[in-house]
Amino acid sequence: MSLHAYWAYGLCIHAELDCPELPPYSQLSGSPDVTIHLLPALPSASQSLGNPIYDVQPGIFSLAVPGVACYRVEEGCRIFIEPLPDAPIERVRLFLFGSVMGALLYQRGLFPLHGSAVETDWGAMIFVGAQGAGKSTLAAQFHHRGYRLLSDDVCAVAPTEDGLRILPALAKFRICADAFERLGAPQGGRFDVDKYVVPMDAGYCPHPVPLRAIHVLQIDDPATSECAAPAFRMLSGLDRVRRLLENLYRPQYLKGQLTQASLVRLAAVIAQQATLAVVTRRRNPSESDELVGFLESAWADHFGLIPSAVQNTAIHAEAKS
């Protein structure tokens, strides 16, 4: 079976299946950080898929997805996949780069947030929040305005000697149909499983970026949303750590990991070093472009105006129009 080489989350990945979601890596020689293996489906595997099941043991994570596959992650460096007969390969990869990759990041001591991240002149900005809060849509809108994408869905925060960094991940984002249409059906976009997948190409940031802020997106109360404008509220105290842990990617996967204690401590470090803010807005998808402008102004107020960022945004916005 031929191997494919990729580079994501600062890791060299060798896979026994084609993974168009991952940025390609030119080298197949040397020892990879992570290997992805395809195994033949076993009768015992298919019988165990009555309901979604996951299991966390020290150094080992297992996941069974009905109608799709069984996955096993070992020591942050090996992933084994047993696809079920006739399982669409797109769905096999969907869970591979979602739940399974999140578990691998936990095993490697990285802090995976459920959100999307973009590169700005102020640093990396992450958008987290509940399902339907508009994380991917907002990142796509920033990309439409000329910003480069770092990650969508799973954002890995890494502690380094130079401070906290966001690691570049999948070179694409997944957005719902209405957001895809509002962005003018970006070139290369295709419908995949349940959303449109849009590749980044030149709009992808391939290197780690210092973490600057994490934004918790919230939808305004419907009773007041008719007149409410976007709001930017800084978080303080222990509420910052609580919000970080709430917005982990699949937080239930952390319990039982060898890295659990160290990642809880890392949450405190992130809360001290990064800005955390709640961004409240109306439930009106057509106003996502307005929210981009609002956040640019908020960043200029809180972090200092960077003329080049404002100028570049204006140039990109004009080029897109």
Image (cartoon, rainbow, N blue to C red):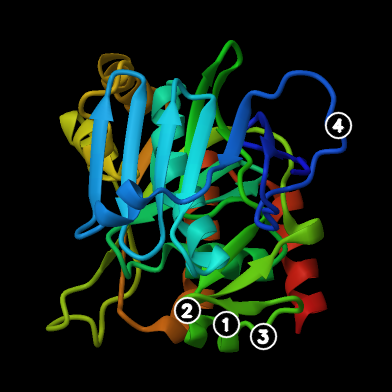
Q: Secondary structure at mark 1?
A: helix
Judging depth in this view, the residue of 99 and 173 nearest the camera is: 99
Residue named by callout 2: 176
Q: Residue at x 58, y 89 (%)?
A: 181
- Comparing marks 1 and 4, which lies closer to the viewer? 4
**Quarter of the figure that contains the N terminus:** top right
Asked whether the residues under the numbered discs 3 and 2 touch, taking CB atoms below 8 Å apart as contact, a structural biologist would say no
Answer left or right for 61 relative to 35: left
| Amino acid marked by disc 4 | Gln
Asked whether the residues under the numbered discs 1 and 4 touch, taking CB atoms below 8 Å apart as contact, a structural biologist would say no
Q: Label 4: how many residues lie within 10 Å, few (<14), some (14-19) or many (20+)?
A: few
Residue 57 x %, y %? 26, 24
Which disc number belongs to residue 180? 1
Q: Earlier in the sequence, mark 3 or mark 2?
A: 2
Residue named by callout 4: 27
Q: Earlier in the sequence, mark 4 or mark 2?
A: 4
| Amino acid marked by disc 1 | Phe
Q: Earlier in the sequence, mark 3 or mark 4?
A: 4
